[in-house]
Image (cartoon, grey):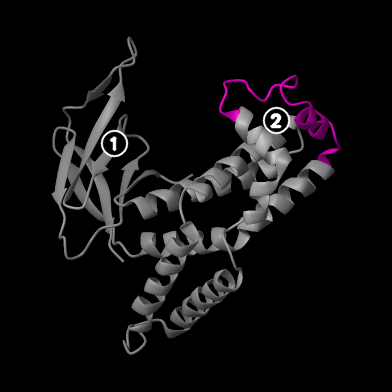
Amino acid sequence: MNQNIIYEQPLNERIRSFLRLEFLFAEAAHHLRGTSHWDSRSTLTALLDIMAIFGRTDLKTEVLKELERHAATLARLEQNPDVDRKRLSETLAELEALTDHLHHNGGPIAATLRGNEFLSAIQQRSAIPGGTCDFDLPGYHFWLEQPAAERTRDLAEWLKHFEAIAGAIQLILKMIRESASIKPVIAEKGFFQKTLDPNLPCQLVRVAVKRKVPYFAEISGGRHRFTVRFLSASEEDGHLHQTTEDIPFELGCCVI
């Protein structure tokens, strides 16, 4: 087990959406391996959340912009003698392949799924607490009663619509995370604040805390500064309290 707990805070809307999608893709992949009705329900819930995010904004364009920006940044490193040329070449090739795939996949991501009446009915009822009970959606109930192999096949086919863009988001976030060098710092009396350089916009703040520390890190911020507070919940009433202890932790500001 990793000795640290990693906390992350996106500092712009694009990275916020990417992190949410990364979480949902991981959730869907985890439950897709299960065979119970509840696994299929959880996979489908994650799929519907993914569809909802893609339905609100043109994320395909956002992803393409990020891929092209990272490719341009890395291309400028080709003349640097200290660069691992083999790794750089492999990363550039992966960026180019993902960019080409998304360009050639015309139209919005998973456009055909939006016309799927079965999924639309479940999505509409999902907004109601307990709205996907058996009596609310008999068609869903019937589908859940089919053999696990059939349910898994259907779910995998629906998720395949997002395969390329999921890979692109994963690569973008990997490069962003690896762009920051982690430095040890101290939150005096449980509080830390840092001013950011507007000429080098930070996209993602990463905080690494030892598992033995009995507090969690709450990060908040924007373009100009961010803060980290170390909190714990009262056992009596659940209220959050900031510690008065000095807390050592590791900090990374990802600016690629």
Residue hosting label 2: 38
Residue 141 magenta-drawn? yes
Is residue 31 visible in the rendered structure shown here?
A: yes
Does residue 244 appear left or right of residue 31 in this picture?
left
Q: Which image quarter: residue 102?
A: bottom right
Range covered by the magenta-colored residues: 126-149
In the displayed structure, 1 sits above or below 233; it is below
Q: Residues within 10 Å of mark 1 (few under 14, many from 20)?
A: some
Q: Earlier in the sequence, mark 2 or mark 1?
A: 2
Image position of 87 (left or right of 28): left
Residue 197: name its quadrant: bottom left
Amino acid residing under circle 2 = Trp
Depth order, front residue of 58/238:
58
Quadrant the C terminus occupies: bottom left
Q: Is residue 122 above or below residue 16?
A: above
Q: Amino acid at mark 1?
A: Glu
Residue at horizontal 41 percent and vertical 68 percent from the top: 65
Residue 38 image point, x, y percent: 70, 30
Element class at badge 1: strand
Name the residue tied to disc 1: 218
**Farthest residue in the top direction?**
236
